[in-house]
Amino acid sequence: MTAPTWKNPLVKWVDTRLPIFTFMHHDLIDYPTPKNLNYMWNFGSLLGIILVIMIATGIFLSFNYTAHVDLAFDSVERIMRDVNHGWLIRYLHMNGASMFFLVVYIHIFRGLYYGSYKAPRELLWIIGVAILLVMMATAFDGYVLPWGQMSFWGATVITNLFSVIPFVGDKIVIWLWGGFAVDNPTLNRFFSLHYLLPFVIFGLVFLHIWALHTAKSNNPLGIDIKGDQDTIPFHPYYTIKDSFGFGVFLIIYLGITLFTPNLLGHPDNYIRANPLVTPAEIVPEWYFLPFYAILRAVPDNFIDIFGLLPVIIDAKTSGVVLMFASILILCLLPWLDRSKVRSAKFRPIYRQLFWIFLADCLVLGWVGAKPAEGTMLIIGRVATFWYFFHLLILVPLVSKYEKTRDLPESINASVLSKRTEIQVPAE
Amino acid sequence: MAGSTTDQKVEAENGGDTETRRDFLLISTVSVGAVGAAIAAWPFIDLMNPSADVLAMASTEIDLSSIEEGQSITAMWRGKPVFIRKRTSEEIESASNVEMMDLKDPEQDAARVQKPEWLVMIGICTHLGCIPLGQKTGQIKGEYNGWFCPCHGSHYDTAGRIRKGPAPKNLEIPPYKFIDNSSIRIG
Ligand code: HEM
Ligand code: FES
């Protein structure tokens, strides 16, 4: 791909001094994309668009939002009732966060199925995990801002997690709060961070795409691009496909936002925060539920079960460690999975395990929404066990012993052979 | 490459001596710079700690005269709820008759109170910070008739000690003094 020659003199003038147009041309128009991508490859560009929507709606919300414990709740109510179209912008932002997580989870499972985390895309994958972590921090901060009951108690429970850090834990929690409880200093810094972190995500996305365009896109067959016959330019082929996908996304996103905007929220967050009354059950937003289930899964009598071992950490600490580990462990996946074959299409055993793992994560999410007692607790423990067992034991073992199917010769060959198959009945 | 030939020349001329002097300068400059950067970071980190006005609200006086036996009130201290309960004699008795072996965080009842009838403690569950129930009549008090945290099911006894559930420690006792027989200062 040679650099394009620019006709517009102004564009040309800028481009010779700062080749920004050449850069955009390479990465948004010429970018050689495998020609066999299916709809699972729509979610990346969708995430980029959602990030822009979140930043845009967020900035407009901030024009009318007041980050003070006495005023925050009322300022959000004012946005809902008095500010022109405030209700729309807020509901777009609120449900946008949910859609963001829905799409990112699909995007991640796509990677798990097609082995997109394997060489040479390890760093691309790790940057992705970093984006997920910062997204979680951003959404957690944002949920505190309306200063409802769930805002306050969610913030209290989650910041308290840091108290398990040995020796300095309590000091760190006070430092995070800027006081002796979640209070005005906490709300102020959360707003500041909530404004900042999306731009950090933006920077990480830039690195993510840079790494992607260096390693090139994976594809449903998981085999390497062997030459020009395997690819087509990003524009117009994938710009049009991504636009179509965005249209479908908008139907769902706007459908929820306009017809059932509070479907995914918790009614208690329309009650003003009260530091003296804990809600009957503290439930995080749906996208945190699997992790919440892992947090609460560790048995209280953990110490008794392993009574023979010198156990230095209690149930609370191990729950917190497991929860953070459940995400960080994903960074190791490229090395846990030793199989040279990327796509689960050609890995009969891994493919079964993938679907079980997906079901396991859904079960964790379901358990996270229920009170941690009785059968729910047992199911939560089994599902937590399976989560780690899958990633740490099954994946390495299967990748070593599985007999994989034969890979097609090239992307092009596979695409063409499908074509002849389809043409047969017509002849 | 050009650099390395010059370096080699210099090294040859000075018998290798320059390299160590240059290394010394480099290492000391970098170390001083690193220490400077670390010191400069401190004001930023410390800015996030509780400020003077937050610390200034660190003590509260509370009048106890209106609390009847078997009643509790909740006061605020440093933005945290403080549970103050005038315990009944049965409650005091059951709290002091517990074997230390049965406790997760062993502590004598007598060590948790200044006057046996007055139990003063921070009303925040030591698990993840919810407010336990049991202050108002009619609320669930848990299996040990003290307090019950609904968030993840921690049961506290009539001395506020953890007896069952995920919380690791007893409810914390704040620093306080009796000013006279019917009022205290917390903090
Ligand atoms: C990564 C992108 C972002 C995510 C995932 C996110 C997430 C959230 C969430 C979950 C809420 C709570 C909604 C509710 O229940 O009311 C929220 C509120 C808020 N966000 Fe964001 N946000 C993002 C970007 C931004 C940006 C860039 C700003 C710009 C300042 C912003 C400003 C606000 C404001 C002012 C509120 C409080 C008003 C409200 O509660 O609706 N957000 N955010
Ligand atoms: S916060 Fe009280 S039991 Fe978890």
Image: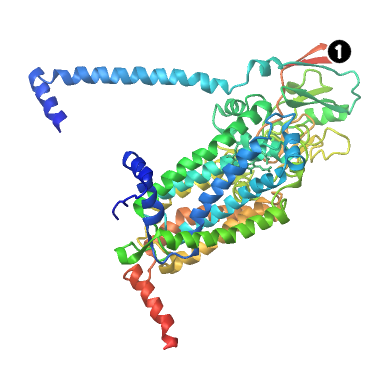
Image x and y of residue B56, in percent: 69, 14
User: Is residue B187 shown above or below B167?
Assistant: above
Helix, strand or loop at mark 1: loop
Which chain contains the residue that carries disc 1? Answer: B
Position of the N terminus of chain A by quadrant: bottom left
Q: In the depicted view, which residue is nearer to us: B12 or A410? A: A410
Image x and y of residue A353, in percent: 49, 63
Q: How is the image coloured?
A: rainbow
Residue receiving disc 1:
B181
Q: Residues within 10 Å of mark 1 (few under 14, many from 20)?
A: few
Q: Amino acid at mark 1?
A: Asn
User: Is residue A13 shown above or below A219?
Assistant: above
Seen at 82% across and 36% down, the residue is B145
Seen at 55% across and 32% down, the residue is A165
Position of the C terminus of chain A by quadrant: bottom left
Going by the image, does B161 lie left or right of A222?
right
Image x and y of residue A336, in percent: 41, 53
Q: In the depicted view, which residue is nearer to us: B135 or A411? A: A411
Seen at 65% across and 39% down, the residue is A61
Image x and y of residue A65, in percent: 68, 34
